[in-house]
Image: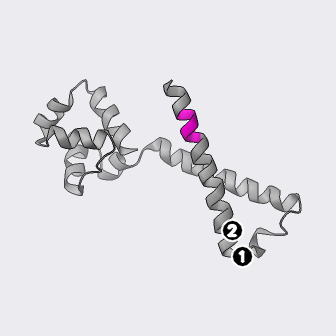
Amino acid sequence: MLSEKLKKLRKSKGITQKQLADETGLSVSMISKIEEGHKTGSDETLQTLANYFNLTLDELRVDKLDVEIEKRKEYVVDELLKRLVQKGLITNTQNIDSDLQKLITYTIKETLNKIIEEEKIKKEQ
């Protein structure tokens, strides 16, 4: 998430929100709200932050871990659908109604999201 990434970047430089604000011309309030996840910031604000940290706008917005998690989710969904076919619960993924396939995929992804969030909470405790 952008909020976590910004906080990590700032802390890796060993600076406070005020120092980041002073060096970028942004307000402390805006930086705080982005780090807390209350605001995402305009493209201009994010570009200012990306420039400060020598990143592209996409690099600032997208966390490599998030990309890896999405790839793993896709793999898990594909594997589960294959197993449903192997067990005979469905005959073929190509024969599934597209709405049903979307529902299955959505349900699996949401379940994975919940598991990931629970794991994050456990690690924080």
In the displayed structure, would residue 85 be above or below residue 23? below
Inspect the magenta stretch and tell me whether residue 117 lies in it: yes
Label 2 to label 1: alpha-carbon separation: 6 Å
Residue at image point 32% right, 39% down: 36
45 to the left or right of 9: left
Magenta highlight on residue 124: no
Instruction: Say if mark 2 contacts mark 1, CB within 8 Å.
Output: yes
Left/right of residue 70 with respect to residue 47 in the rendered view? right
| Residue 58, x across and y down, in percent | 35, 52
- Return the residue at label 1: 97
Q: Nearer the viewer, residue 114 or 98?
A: 114
User: Does 89 sit left or right of 114 as displayed?
Assistant: right
Name the residue type under label 2: Gln
Q: Position of residue 77 (x, y in %)?
A: 68, 55
Pick whichever, 49 or 56, lies toward us: 49
Residue 74: x %, y % from top left? 62, 54
Amino acid type, label 1: Asp
Say which quadrant the N terminus sits in. top left
Q: Nearer the viewer, residue 118 or 5?
A: 118
Foreground pick, 105 / 64: 105
Give the residues in magenta: 116-120
Residue under the point 30% across and 49% down: 56
At x 19%, y 55%, the residue is 44
Judged from the image, the secondary structure of the residue bearing numbered disc 2 is: helix
Numbered badge on residue 40: none
* Residue 54 visible in the current orientation: no
Quadrant housing residue 119: top right
Residue beneath label 2, please?
101
For the stretch drawn in magenta, the main secondary structure is: helix
